Amino acid sequence: MLNDFLITLAQLLMLPEQWHNTFIFSCNIIIAITVFFLSFILGRIWIKPILAHILDKLDGRLTYETETERRKLSSYITHLLPPLVLQMLMPLLFTQYPQLSAGLSVLIWLYLYVFIGLVVAAVIDFIAKTYSLLATNPTIPYQGIAQLLKLLSVMLFGILIVSTALNKSPTLLLSGLGALTAVLLLVFKDAILGFVASIQIAVNNMVNVGDWIEMPKYGADGDVVEIALTTVKIRNWDKTITTVPTYALISDSFKNWRGMQQSGGRRIKRAINIDINTIRFINAEELEKLGQQQQLKDFFQLPDIKTLLHSNDVTNIALFRHYVRWRLTLNKNINQEMTLIVRQLQPTEVGLPVEIYCFSADKQWANYEGIQADIFDRLFAILPVFDLAVFQRISSRQEMVVRH
């Protein structure tokens, strides 16, 4: 029908009969190019805004965060309209040129496969980004799953593209890939190991995005910012990024601080080494003087301390231990519902360690360090009141003074 119209048009234009085929062919080419670009322009004008509106309805409150993913998805979908329209017009345009029609049909399908693959990848990215924004504590390794799905889609559409270009059945290519299994396993080794590791990490809830982990082997100490198919990104406390293979979380050991973050406190475990030569008994007169100290008045009024003072073998180290525990029970920054111990450790060549084992109620790093420092500042200052001293190696200057 279209060719008849073009022949009539050629006759009206009084073209020589030998030019009719060239005229018809040229008109068909012009019509095909015009339809292709018109459908592309109309798609961007009509279809793209409609798709953007639909996607806005799906995640309206995440419009800004997913803007890049939505633009890619709507743009790729609009690229599907021109080849589809052109494929529908092929029987009308090039019926007299079967070889040209077959060649153009192959090019159209190659174009379609490329952009369908891009659409699938854009959908996966959009879903992954939406999940990462909506999930407050994501336990599914969405990045790894998204990358695996995109890898599978690339392989699938790659096979379709090659089979279409070679005019062969995809099953023949798939059967040929069986002989390359060993090569494929070698090429995709990291992806396969990462996928298996991602499943184990998700099932066992070993690591989530936002967890603080330590992996000394890789120099990693910080928060997990991304769990992908083949790599895990960790932002260290010095703001550097350490990239660790995903399967390393299964094959190697690491420390996850999530338990501390979810608990009621952060552990303080530090000892003061007391000079053993300063440990001694305290007589009644010295006890009376201690009780008059401004820092110890309330401490000496405790029932347990009064009972201790009635014994005849009170040591300054025992009083100091009881005082430390009393001060910790008064500290509002210490979680009183968790373990609180003041204990002696095995004496060593550097003195008698008196260890404090408790939990800071504030788990923020800076606040935690401040609380810990305040506790030990006071303890170092109060030691001389009990006539105790911290063990300290003699420096070269002190050694010269002693010799003189």
Image (tube, rainbow, N blue to C red):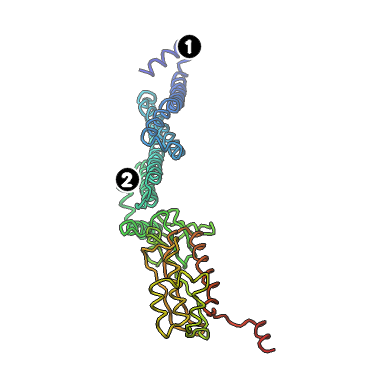
Query: Could you say which disc has been placed on residue 24 in the image?
Result: none
Of the two numbered discs 2 and 1 in the rendering, the one whose residue sits closer to the viewer: 2
- Residue lying at the far bottom of the rendered structure: 403
The image shows residue 146, relative to residue 241, as above or below, that is above
Q: Please tell me how crowded label 1 is: few (under 14), some (14-19), or many (20+) other residues with Cα within 10 Å.
A: few
The residue drawn where x is 47% and y is 85% is 281
The residue drawn where x is 51% and y is 74% is 292
Q: Position of residue 122 (x, y in %)?
A: 41, 41
C-alpha distance separating marks 2 and 1: 49 Å
The image shows residue 247, relative to residue 272, as above or below, that is above
Rendered image quadrant of residue 331: bottom left
What kind of element bears circle 2? helix
The residue drawn where x is 40% and y is 46% is 132
Look at label 2 and name its amino acid. Pro
Given residues 42 and 307, the one toward you in this image is 307
Q: Which residue is mark 2?
A: 170
Q: Please tell me how crowded label 2 is: few (under 14), some (14-19), or many (20+) other residues with Cα within 10 Å.
A: some
The image shows residue 117, relative to residue 256, as above or below, that is above
> Image check: 32 left or right of 388?
left
Given residues 397 and 178, the one toward you in this image is 397
Look at label 1 and name its amino acid. Leu
Q: Which residue is mark 1?
A: 13
Q: Position of residue 135 (x, y in %)?
A: 37, 47
The residue drawn where x is 45% and y is 16% is 17
Given residues 263 and 18, the one toward you in this image is 263
> Quarter of the image containing the N terminus?
top left
What kind of element bears circle 1? loop
Given residues 402 and 201, the one toward you in this image is 402
The mark nearer the N terminus, 2 or 1, is: 1
> Image check: 217 left or right of 303?
right
